Amino acid sequence: MSNTSKTPLSSVLYLSHGGGPLPLLGDKNHQNLIRFMMEITPALTKPSAILVISAHWEENIPTIASGVLPTLIYDYYGFPKESYEIKYSVPGSSTLANKIFNLLKNAGIEAKLDSHRGFDHGLFVPLKIMYPDASIPCVQLSLVNSLQPEEHIQMGKALADLRKDNVLIIGSGFSFHNIKEFFAPSTKQTQAMNESFEQWLMDTCSISQLTEPERTQRLINWESAPAARYCHPREEHLLPLHVCHGVAGTAANRVFEFEIMGKMASAYLW
């Protein structure tokens, strides 16, 4: 459905959320990311609600966290004690969760609601920095564990009308997600591999000369990009971007690139 009203559409944002709770601990290797998260918020119209598609939740079909006050899931290991005492008492929204369910259903996508599932760190880490007062209702949507790019783009297309309701849609992943390489010495070769994939991703998401079918095909066939499997041995941190692309259906308006833990990573705003 095309947008025929003059109501501005809400923003769509794909961000790299960093390593576990480290941004909330003030980690020196995350200072660029922390600064980005703090500075991007004023550029966004204050949303009435937030939908987060997190890399850290996979189900056999799209699943929507519909609880009224979801608990936090500390889904990381080996961090300091304070990492497991983080609070972010943001309300959920059963109304928005049901709307998401119905939009997916109307698009022929089987989905389910989960009133018990809490919010994982893909949601509370960035939002605690971006919206520290925890006053904006949030809903989280899972990935599908088949990890099929086209399926996630279709999910995004089904949710495009949420932008008319001032819902901020955030894909929370990481444009570089090779855990072993974060802790391995960087070489000219690995740096070039990291940068070549980043350049391909930035071009794919932002070049206006691409037609939308061309952009979509590039994202569907992302494994053919330079160093794709070096940067993403498993693609769950990339797929929130596919959902965002499906929602937006255009080139990104702004691209952000920064270093996190010695690797180049990026974020995209529509």
Image (tube, helix red, strand yellow):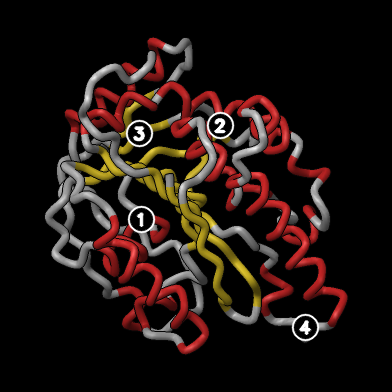
Q: Nearer the viewer, residue 154 or 8?
A: 8
Residue 44 x %, y %:
27, 53
Q: Mark 2 points at which residue?
A: 152
* Mark pair 1, 3: CA separation: 13 Å
Q: How far apart are marks 2 and 3 (CA)?
A: 14 Å
SS for tag 1?
helix
Give me the C-alpha separation between circle 4 and circle 3: 39 Å
Quadrant in which residue 27 is drawn: bottom left
Q: How far apart are marks 2 and 1 (CA)?
A: 18 Å
Q: Horizontally, is 44 left or right of 112 in the view?
A: left
Task: Looking at the picture, tell me which residue is in the foreground, 23 or 110.
Answer: 23
Q: What residue type is labelled 2?
A: His
Residue kind at label 3, given as amino acid type:
Ile
Per the image, the residue denoted by label 1 is: 123
- The alpha-carbon separation of the residues under discs 1 and 4 comes to 29 Å
At mark 2, the secondary structure is helix
- How far across and down, in percent of the image, does residue 179 sit? 67, 69
Tell me: residue 81, above or below residue 202. below
Identify the residue at image location x=39%, y=75%.
34
Q: Which kind of residue does numbered mark 1 sit on?
A: Leu
Q: Position of residue 65 (x, y in %)?
A: 31, 38
Residue 186: numbered disc: 4
Query: At numbered mark 3, what does the secondary structure look like: helix, strand or loop?
Result: strand
Q: Which is nearer the N-term, disc 2 or disc 1?
A: 1
Crowding at label 1, few (<14), some or many (≥20) Cα neighbours within 10 Å? many
Nearest the viewer among 38 and 236 is 38
Mark 4 Cα shell of 10 Å, populated few (<14), some (14-19), many (≥20)? few
**Of pointers 1 and 3, the one earlier in the residue sequence:** 3
